[in-house]
Amino acid sequence: MTEVGPMKIVVSSHGPYRVVGKVPLSVQTIVPNERDESWEWKEGRTFPVDEEYFLCRCGQSKTKPFCDNSHLRVGFEGKETASRRPLERQSEHLDGPTHTLSDAEGYCAFARFCDPGGKIWSLIARTDDPKVRELVIREAAHCPSGRLVLRDKATGQTVEPTLPPSIGLVEDPVLRVSGPLWVRGGVRVESPDGTPYEVRNRVTLCRCGASTNMPFCNGSHASIKFQDGLR
């Protein structure tokens, strides 16, 4: 994935995300189908941003999505625990007729786009059927965290959606929770000392303060019923 510069997100030590480069910020809502399965993304409210701004990481700010220094009041401990290994090396791999599926389960943001029409882990074995293949590509491409990555066996290329460099504030009305920061289009994420994480097209960062895979989302917002008050 080609890094987009000079845009970047710095994970402050036990504090907020420092966003540099006037990265666009908007609400991204999961739209369900008639069976309440995650089906589409819908962009909502956009926020005016400066060249540099700070997003809440502890989940306690009264001015979400922006930081109001509540991390100091609550004694937030946001130690980075995620591996620095490329995601491909952290993934399990499933082989299908036309595509392989890489799955890094620890990065699941619980958006559930992998479920409609049959779970993607079962469907990958039937990608020689054009309709099934289309559904598999759709399900993987809609995964915000990049947990699920498809590779075309004929070309050897990963199948990635075209995403603008931006940050989405995920809202999940079916579960009635607010989700992670959806970082898109190759925006760099780094530690306070400048050490970068792997640059990827799709990344989800925790903003509820409860992930055990900091700074990345692991779906904890769903279990704690996190609400940002933006809906």
Image (cartoon, rainbow, N blue to C red):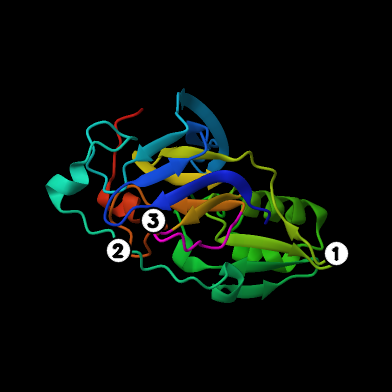
Does residue 221 lie above or below 94 as drawn? above
**Quadrant that contains the C terminus:** top left
Query: First in sequence: mark 1 or mark 3?
Result: 1
Residue 172 position within the rendered picture, expressed as x and y whole percent measured from the top left: 42, 39
Q: Residue furthest front?
A: 193
Q: How far apart are marks 3 and 2 (CA)?
A: 17 Å
Q: How far apart are marks 1 and 3 (CA)?
A: 33 Å
- Residue 72 visible here: yes
Inspect the magenta stretch and tell me whether residue 231 lies in it.
no
Q: In this view, does 46 lie to the left or right of 1?
A: left
State the SS at label 2.
loop
Q: Mark 1 points at which residue?
A: 155
Residue 218 position within the rendered picture, expressed as x and y whole percent measured from the top left: 40, 59
Does residue 85 lie above or below 151 as drawn? below
Amino acid tagged 2: Lys
Are the two marked residues, 3 and 2, in contact with CB atoms closer than 8 angstroms? no
Q: Mark 3 points at which residue?
A: 219
State the SS at label 1.
loop
Are the two marked residues, 1 and 3, in contact with CB atoms closer than 8 angstroms? no
Q: In which quarter of the image is residue 146?
A: bottom right
**3 or 2: mark nearer the eye:** 2
Stretch in magenta:
191-200
**Residue found 54% across the figure and 74% down from its top:** 90
Q: Quadrant of residue 120?
A: bottom right
Q: Classify 10 Å Cα crowding around label 2: few (below 14), some (14-19), many (20 and above).
A: some
Q: Is residue 31 left or right of residue 17?
A: right
Q: Name the residue under label 2.
A: 79
- Residue 173 visible here: no
